[in-house]
Amino acid sequence: AEVVLNITTVFHDNNLPTDQLTGGLLQITFNGTLLDIIPIETNGTQTITLPLPLSAISSQGNNGRNVLSLDLKTNFGCNSTQDIIVGIQSTSYFKLPHQFTEPQLDLEQFPYPLQQNSFLPDEAVLITPDTPTASELEAIMNTAAGLGRLTRRTTINMMPYSALTDDLRAVNHLIFVGLPEDFPIMADIAFVDAAADESDGMLQIAASPWNPAKVVLYIGGATETGVNKAAKALGLGAIRTGSSKQTAVINDIYFELPAEQAATRIQSFGNLGYELTTLRGPDMASASFNFYIPPELKVNEEETASFTLLYNHSALLNYELSGINILLNGSPVKSLRIDENGLNLSHELVELPARLFQPGDNTLRFVSELAPIDACSGFKVEGSWFNIFPESSFNLPLIENLRDKAPAVILNQYPLPLAYDASLATTAFILPPNDTAAWFAALQIAYQLGDAVSGDLLDIQVALANDVPESIRTENNLVLIGRPSDLPILSELKLPVPVSLETNRFEHNRLPVEYDIPSDVSLGYLNILPSPWHIDYVVLSILGDSDEGIQNATANLLVNRRNLNGDFAVIESDQTFVTMTPLPKSSGGTSSASQTTDTAGLETATEGETAVSPPADTTASDTTATETNETPDPAATEQAQSAPENNPPQPTAATGQSSTNQNAAKRNLPMLPVAVLVVCTIALAIFGIIFFFTRKKRS
């Protein structure tokens, strides 16, 4: 093992000739082990190759991270005008010869070995039955959510059993989810058996017979009930084994609702995975600590949230010129003066305003400026430090985040409102019975949702599109995935854009601009709307006219959701078109398509409805309306006048015919000042005549 450094050195001093410039020493360490001290004596580039001792390479300590440190030491005087720059080129690299070893087979260490946090990517393939039932698909989705909760960096692919080839078996970790009879090849795997009842779940891990560096994980049982128990237990992470570390038997799963959601969460940096952190001077330095607040919880504004900082610092600091700023999500919350009290282990209580917290990821950041007593001292770097200890902790009074309004129906709020339920027990996937592309899209969504919530046990539900129970409709947020023609439930939704069940495409002449899209171009669609079955839930549709369209829509929601500022999106390859619905009718299109037998019976925007689209420049809108000289529509005017006063306007509304009425009214506004001007002119004229004759009479 070795490190190869390509460096460029530049000396500069306007007051000295080149031959009088002095260099320095570049000290290179790896995980604290000194590799070499390189003299820096001339301008130019050079390549430094240094061996890495095996004893210095860390695989477990410091969270598995390895640190290469480069420290430039010079003999410049404090008032020297000479500069020296050492640049490390991006062509520098590590050479790490390695070999794969057989992983340890221990379920209690899960998610290892599926996630090993090495410099190589972690990948696994989840194998499904060829024709899974709704219950088996439910187990697959809960497995995916559990893996998302535990293995954020592992790539999970999916395929049916019949697609598993010799080549795929040889290069991947494999995860089988289902009944034993679904996977005949498991007879070749040396699982350790354990006594279990018919309704029990089973988790088993074994070395892959096709590659000893890979493992096979089985999530199943003798019945579908057992399969689902095993899938939900996996997501908990803390797996208890019996006589063998390779097998765990799950008797039952208990979803216990907390008697009281209100609780004070005390969490230390150490519990969050952070170790001792040192800020070093003499220049400004910073360190950030990330923590997560589940969307279903919030900080109680009636109590005081706080952070206790445990710290100490060097005695060689200039206390008058040194200090620490503490920021929560970018907003300053505390400034800390440095004095002799911090020479020993000290603590500082920092109050954190509740309004600065946000659902999901939060960041507490420390910014330091540590000035040495003697700025000319060669010890100014080593002697300027501030330690933040991992025992520093948050004290957050968390309560249930009750929603006092309808759930968010805009795509960029995803994974809300689904993630409001910490166990995902109010999320149900509606999937076609024979569509592996839709199943894989659902697996990706479930994986991300598992990472977004904090529940110990996850309980996603699944129904096949041709048989959706009433309880699934009325008690859940629904996630519809697939081709529209494979999802009969779409015909029960009042979508504002009709969809053809022959082409699996939405009627594009109902969008703000109509384009001619060839039939060989794959299109994906995203839509979110309030559930017609329950006011507290939503229906999220991830659709496509092909496998590629479904995958593009899924990837857009997972990766690009911040740009989805609407409730309806069309995805074409790497382009995304987003709008708010209901949409205005096209002036050039026909509405007959919405009445044909091959189109789902979906309700569309009517003439009098306000059309909502991305914000427009109101000045430009008024000018356009004036130039086109449109006349008010009496029907639209009557509807606008009869609208309830408590119906709030959409902040992003770009009006259709109702805007014409408003613009027409605006065109009449100038008549009022003209009339006033005429009256004033006549009055002045009369006053002038009276004044003239009165003056003449007096004279």
Image: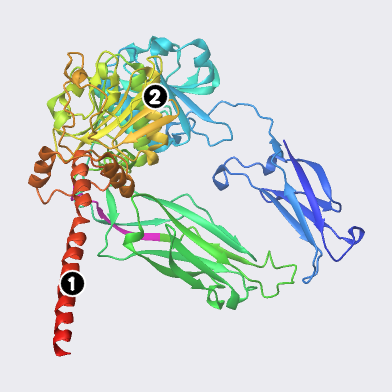
Task: Tell me which residue sits at (36%, 19%) in the image.
Answer: 437
Query: Eyeballing the image, is 55 above or below 679?
Result: above
- Residue positioned 18% across, 19% down in the render: 467
SS for dot 1: helix
Residue 525: image location, x then y, percent: 32, 27
Q: Quadrant of residue 264?
A: bottom left
Q: Amino acid at mark 1?
A: Ala
Q: Choose top left, top right, bottom left or bottom right for residue 45.
A: top right
In magenta stretch: residue 393: no
Query: Would you place residue 580 above or below residue 367 in this image?
Result: above
Residue 577, image x, y percentages: 37, 32
Q: Amino acid at mark 2?
A: Gln
Looking at the picture, tell me which residue is in the foreground, 314 or 600: 600
What residue is disc 2 on? 551
Question: Which part of the image, by quadrant, shows the N terminus?
Answer: top right
Residue position marked by numbered label 1 in the rendering: 685
Examine the rendering and report whether any part of residue 622 can be seen: yes
On screen, residue 138 above or below 284: above
Magenta span: 394-405
Residue 620, image x and y in percent?
Answer: 33, 46
Can residue 488 be seen here? The reply is no
Nearest to viewer (mark 2 / mark 1): 1
- The local secondary structure at tag 2 comes to helix
Q: Residue at x 47, y 49 (%)?
A: 273
Q: Earlier in the sequence, mark 2 or mark 1?
A: 2
Q: Which mark is residue 300?
A: none
Q: Which residue is nearer to you in this view: 285 or 636?
A: 636
